[in-house]
Amino acid sequence: MAVTEMKRINLCAPQSSRKQILEFLQSSGAAELDFTPFEDEDLKKKDTAGRHAIFERNALNADLAIETLDEFCDIKKPAFSSLAGKKFITRKEYEKIIADRKQLVNECSAVISLKNEISACRGKILKLESDIEALSPWLLLDVPFNIKGTKTTAVFFGSLPAAETDEIIFSALTDLKADFKEISKDKNNRYIGVISDMATAAKVKDNLRKIGFALPPLSFKGLPSEYKNELENEIQSLNNEIESKNAEIATYAGRRNAFCILSDYYRIRAEKYRVLDNVPQSEKTFFLSGYIPAYETAKVCSVMSEKYGAVVEEEAASDAPVLLKNSKIPSSFEGVLESFGLPKKGEIDPTAIMSVFYIFLFGLMLSDAAYGLIISLACFFMLKKFPAMEESMKKSVRMFMYCGLSTLFWGILFGGYFGDAPDVISRVFLGRTANKPVIPALWFVPINNPMKLLLYSMLFGLIHLFTGLGIKGFTLIKQKDYKAFFFDVVSWFLLLAGLLLMLLKSSIYASLSGSALPLGKIGSLIAEIMAAVGAVIILLTAGRPSKNIGKRLAKGAYGLYDITSWLSDLLSYSRLLALGLATGVIASVINQMGSMAGKSVFGLILFIAVFIFGHTFNLAINLLGAYVHTNRLQYVEFFGKFYEGGGTYKQAAICRVFRQVLRRRRKEIFTV
C-alpha cells in the first residue's frame, strides 16, 4: 500500500556519450524523461526528424507485412492466442535477426508490394464483373454491338423504362422512318435496338429520350456473347495471377517472427531518435532531466557518472508521476484503481485495503460455489498456460481468480452449487425424498432468509464506509492536520456511531432482526450524547473557512445535511442482497426448467441442455453484474469518503518498449 518515492535527476554529459546514455536509460526502463528544466534559448536541439521518420516507416512496413501474412497465409494460432502475450527469444537470436535487418526490410516491402498487386487484381476483377453484369441484357443480340448502320440507315441500342409500352415507343417514332426491336426485358427496363433513316436519326434519339431512352454504358466491338467470353477469360487470368501471388506471399510465412522483432527494433530506435530530437545541447555537452524511483537513483547515477562521465544532480520531485508498489495480491487490483484515478500528491495508495473489500464483496454478490470454482480454475489455467501474458491482462486474470475463490467460499457458506442443482438432481433422477439439502449450507441459505442477508449486507457496508472514513483520518494525521482530523473525522464517527446505536435499540431494527439491542438507560444516554456532540461539532466547524458567523453556520448546517448521503451510501449495499439472491434464484429456475420432463432419457437430455446453456448464461450475466457493482461500491461509496485521485503516470516514451525486458534482463531475454 504505497506510492513509490520518485526523485528528479538533472544530468550534464559530453556529446560523445549521448546515445550510450539514452540507450542505457532505455534498456533499464527506470527513467521518465522531462526536458522542461532545460528550456533555454541558448541550448540547441538536434534535428533527427528524418531518421525518426525512416525508423517509423520501417516499423509500420513490418507491421503491415505481418498483417499481410496473417491475412493470406494459413498460420495456425493456438487457442486463446490473444492471451499468450509476446514471445521471448534469447539475445543471440535477437542479434542474429537484427544483423539481417536490411534484408528483412526488403522482404517486408516485397510482401507489401505483393499485397498491393493482389488488391489491384481484385479491383480489376470487380470492374470486369460489373461489365459482365451490364452486358447481360444484350447477350441475345446477334449483330455486333458497335454496328453503326449503313450509308442510308442508322442503328443504335439503348434502354427504356419497363413501363413504356410498344404503343408509346411507336408514337415517338411516327413519321420518322424508324423501327425498333426488343432484345430483352427485366422488371425495371426494356432493352431495344433501333434502326432509322440516317436523315431522321437525330430526331429519333430526341423523341426517345423524352420517354426515358438511355444509351448503354458499354463500348466494345463484336457480339456481346463473344465479349462476355473475353471478360471471363480475363477474370480467370487475374484469378490465376492472384493465386500465384498468394503462393509467393506464403513463402514468407516463416519470416513472420523475424518481422515482429524487426518492428520492435525499429520502433525502439524511432523512440530513441524522437527523444534525441528534444535533447537540449550545447557545443560539447547535452542535458537530460527526468524522474527515477528513489530505490533506483543511486545505481543509475553511479553508472552514468562512472561509465559515461556525466555530472548528475538529484533532488526531491514535487510533481513526479505516480508509480504504485504493491505485493502480488493487491497489485492485481491496481487496474481498478487506475480506472478511477491514481493517487495525487499527499494521498495514500488504497489498493491493498480496497483489494480485501473487493474480493470479499465480489464473492458475496456472486455467491455460488460451483461458479466460483469454475472462475478460479479457468483463471489459474490461463495464468499457467500463458506465462508471457501482458502484465495488465495478467493482473486482471489474477484479480478474477481471487474473486472466484471468494465466490467459492461464500457459495459453501450459503450452500449454493449451481443453485440447488444437487437437490434437484437427487430428487428427480435419483428418487431422493428427504427434505434436507444434499449439501447443507455452512451458514444459512439466503433465499430462505433474505432479511438476515440484508442485515449482514448493511453491516459489511458500515465496515466498508467506516474504513474509508478511517483512512481519511489517517491521511490527515499523516499530514499533521489535527484540527481537520477532529472536525471532519472524529465528529462524523461520533454522530454516526451514536445514530447507529440509537437505531439498534429501536423498534425498527427489532422488526427487521427479531430483537433490539438492549442498551439500557446509560447506553441510550451515551448514544444520544455521542450523536449530539458529533452533530454540534459538524454544525460549528464544517464552514470554518468562512469568517462570517452566519455563513459559517449555514455551511455547517449544509455539512450536517451530508448525513443523507451516508444513508444513501449505506442503502447501496443492499445490492449485495439483490445480486446474491439473483444468482441463486435464476440458477434454481434453470434447474426447475431443466427437470420439467422428469426422469426419462428425453428428460435427462433436456436437463443437460438447459443446465449447460442456462448456467453459462447465468454465470456470464451475474459475473458482469458482480464486477460492475463491486467497482461501483469502491468508486462511489468507499473512495467517496477519502480519495480524490488525479495523479498521472507518464510512462517514458524512451522506456516504453523495454519495460517488460527489465524483469528478465538477467536471463538475457528480450520481448518481441
Image (cartoon, rainbow, N blue to C red):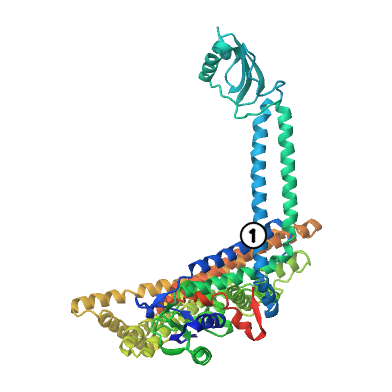
What's the residue at 57%, 81% (across, down)?
27
Residue 125 picture location, percent across and down: 67, 42
Q: Amino acid at mark 1?
A: Ser
Residue behind mark 1 = 109
- As drawn, which residue projects farthest toward the front? 283
Residue 662 picture location, percent across and down: 59, 82
Q: Can residue 582 be spotted in the picture?
A: no
> In the drawing, does residue 416 fall left or right of residue 450?
right
Within 10 angstroms of label 1, few (less than 14), some, or many (20 or more) residues? some
Mark 1 secondary-structure assignment? helix
> In the drawing, does residue 320 fall left or right of residue 58?
left
Q: Nearer the viewer, residue 596 or 225?
A: 225
Residue 152 picture location, percent across and down: 62, 11
Residue 488: quarter of image? bottom left
Whether 451 is drawn above or below 179: the answer is: below
Total of numbered circles in the picture? 1
Residue 571: quarter of image? bottom left
